[in-house]
Image (cartoon, coloured by chain):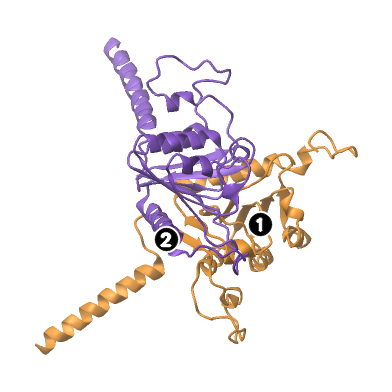
Chain colours: A orange, B purple
């Protein structure tokens, strides 16, 4: 009976451990597929920026809580080689901090954004440019670059309805999908490359002082 | 030699036919995954509404051309039982016509939309309501219902950056993903149900004349 009891406990612990391991390693049927919904509660994400920090953060926000926003940050900060970002509106300070950190770490960051929204109050596009990050914007003023997707190391796609703003993250009803499914990643990678090349300033003549046709 | 030649021709034809069949049936690794990019050229989509029409459409638009928009319409019109739609801004006339047609055909249509954007000029939300389609809106005026996704028969997800407006379809840089991957469809179905229940007018007291706290 004792052996049977111990066996049952060991079995239960084993099942629990396998389940934990599965969650940690995100083993699923096929490539990564994760869906995040917003609004996301405002929690401390300092540990994601300072992984090897010696002291725990002392800010008054809740700590050690996983949220949709912390998952989004984790996915972005997992970039080792490249981050291609196509985003309509970008004013979120912590997302800006993440991009600046990746750039500092040597990750090749490329950003395509909207012509009108890149200059609105609070936009982080100027900060990225000042830091030396390559940013291109939609050249036509008659068209909005309305995408909100990112490609991490060319193999992880982050896409959805979420603009990179505080309102979107903390107030709105929004969705973000994260996937490594090649059939989904590849078309977005091609779209990014197409937009990157189409909006190369070298291929566009500087505008005349009278503003040109599109104004 | 003659037999060998005929064999080679038969083999080549067979390969070609299999390739055609694969494209037609959209056989891929696993469930449907399709990505559509916008802007989409303006072409005639009349044939999608009147599949068994006796006469071809005589409008001046290009005919018989498959575009991102025609694919989006085809996916929506493939609904047999239900269409759950969560959309921020909805003013596109042909998309409205598609929803009205599905409703007329007995498909159960449910719409969740944004409180502010449902009343802007050109919004189709009033038209849907007048036709008897169930529409609920985000109850809080401090929050935007910014999703842009649809669920066809509870098994096909259509999601992306695209609002249902003419500018989004014909001018903007936008993306839409269509998938039947259960791991992706299920969370969106749960989100829809959550929003549907949270915005049930029966659970919300009518506002007082002084406007209440949220105004």
Question: Left or right: B127 with respect to B101?
Answer: right
Q: Position of residue A145 (x, y in %)?
A: 66, 45
Q: Residue at x 75, y 41 (%)?
A: A141
What residue is disc 2 on?
B202
Q: CA distance from mark 2 to mark 1?
A: 49 Å
Question: Left or right: A113 with respect to B56?
Answer: right
Describe the element under mark 1 as helix, strand or loop: strand
Report whether mark 2 lies on the same chain as mark 1: no
Q: Residue furthest right?
A: A209
Tell me if mark 2 has few (under 14), some (14-19) or many (20+) residues whose alpha carbon lies within 10 angstroms of its own. Answer: few
Q: Residue at x 49, y 56 (%)?
A: A177
Q: Nearer the viewer, residue A68 or B151?
A: B151
What residue is disc 1 on?
A109
Task: Report whether residue A124 is seen.
Answer: yes
* Placement of B168 over or under A85, stated as above or below: above
Label pair 2/1, CB-CB below 8 angstroms: no
Q: Position of residue A12 (x, y in %)?
A: 23, 78
Q: Chain of mark 2?
A: B
Q: Residue at x 46, y 35 (%)?
A: B98
Name the quarter where the C terminus of chain A is drawn.
top right
Tell me if mark 1 has few (under 14), some (14-19) or many (20+) residues whose alpha carbon lies within 10 angstroms of its own. Answer: many
Q: Chain of mark 1?
A: A
Q: Residue at x 65, y 57 (%)?
A: A108
* Placement of B78 over or under A161, stated as above or below: above
* Placement of A30 over or under B133, stated as above or below: below
């Amino acid at each position: 009976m004792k052996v049977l009891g111990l066996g049952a406990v060991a079995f239960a612990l084993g099942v629990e451990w396998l389940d934990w391991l599965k969650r940690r390693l995100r083993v699923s049927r096929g490539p990564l597929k994760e869906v995040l919904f917003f609004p996301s509660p405002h929690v401390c994400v300092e540990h994601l920026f300072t992984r090897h920090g010696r002291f725990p953060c002392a800010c008054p926000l809740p700590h050690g809580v996983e949220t949709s926003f912390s998952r989004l940050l984790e996915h972005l900060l997992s970039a080792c080689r490249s981050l291609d970002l196509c985003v309509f509106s970008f004013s979120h300070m912590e997302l800006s901090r993440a991009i600046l950190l990746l750039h500092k770490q040597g990750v090749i960051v490329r950003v395509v954004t909207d012509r009108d929204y890149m200059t609105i109050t609070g936009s982080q596009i100027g900060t990225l440019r000042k830091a030396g990050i390559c940013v291109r914007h939609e050249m036509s003023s008659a068209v909005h670059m309305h995408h909100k997707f990112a490609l991490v190391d060319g193999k992880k796609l982050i896409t959805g309805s979420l603009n990179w703003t505080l309102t979107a993250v903390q107030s709105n009803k929004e969705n973000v999908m994260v996937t490594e499914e090649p059939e989904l990643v590849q078309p977005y990678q091609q779209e990014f490359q197409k937009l990157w090349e189409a909006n190369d300033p070298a291929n566009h003549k500087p505008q005349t002082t009278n503003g040109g046709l599109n104004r």
